[in-house]
Amino acid sequence: MISKTTKTILGAVMAAAVLSTGAHAGDAAAGKKVYNKCRACHSLDEGGPNKVGPNLFGVIDREAAKVDGYKYSTALKESGIVWSEEKLTEFLAAPKTIVPKTKMAFPGLKKPADIENLIAYMKEQ
């Protein structure tokens, strides 16, 4: 029997593999619907407020923990992560696996297509 953690990691690996091959660029319209899961904690508008989580406008290719006015966890500040599409894919599938002790309580997106679509939507913003 495969553990829940192993399934989550496998999902992240599969999503990253699809992204790295360029086999599917994601559907931004579908990603907007997925973003509804993020909306309560994150804004995505330029100049939008930090909420429970930081504003995510322009997050792709930005260093982690760099939004002014947001108090990040020490773990994320010390992670050295740059939010490439691949790293964001891994994180969105299993936040606590990628950055143990992150403040983000969200358990992750289980469907690789949801992650691809969300990233496509974020890229459009």
Image (cartoon, rainbow, N blue to C red):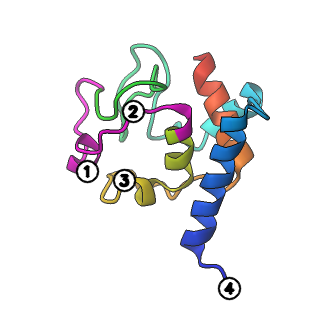
Where disc 4 sits, the SS reads loop
Tell me the residue that label 4 is attached to. Answer: 1
Callout 3 amino acid: Val
CB atoms of marks 1 and 2 within 8 Å: no
Q: Which numbered disc flags the more N-terminal residue, 1 or 2?
A: 1
Residue at the outermost bottom position: 1
Tell me the residue that label 3 is attached to. Answer: 99
Q: Which numbered disc flags the more N-terminal residue, 4 or 2?
A: 4
The Cα atoms of the two marked residues, 3 and 4, are separated by: 25 Å
**51 drawn magenta:** no
Query: In the image, residue 85 lies at what x, y percent?
Result: 56, 33
Left or right, 32 with reference to 89: right
Determine the main secondary structure of the stretch shown in magenta: loop
In the depicted structure, whether residue 123 falls above or below residue 86: above
Query: In the image, residue 29 lies at what x, y percent?
Result: 76, 27
Tell me the residue that label 2 is attached to. Answer: 82
Q: Which numbered disc flags the more N-terminal residue, 3 or 4?
A: 4
Nearer the camera: disc 2 or disc 3: 2
- Quarter of the picture containing the N terminus is bottom right
Where disc 3 sits, the SS reads loop
The Cα atoms of the two marked residues, 2 and 3, are separated by: 13 Å
The Cα atoms of the two marked residues, 4 and 1, are separated by: 31 Å
Q: At 22% across and 38% down in the image, what residue appears?
A: 71
Left or right, 105 with reference to 17: left
User: What segment is highlighted magenta in the picture?
Assistant: 67-86
Callout 4 amino acid: Met
Tell me the residue that label 1 is attached to. Answer: 75
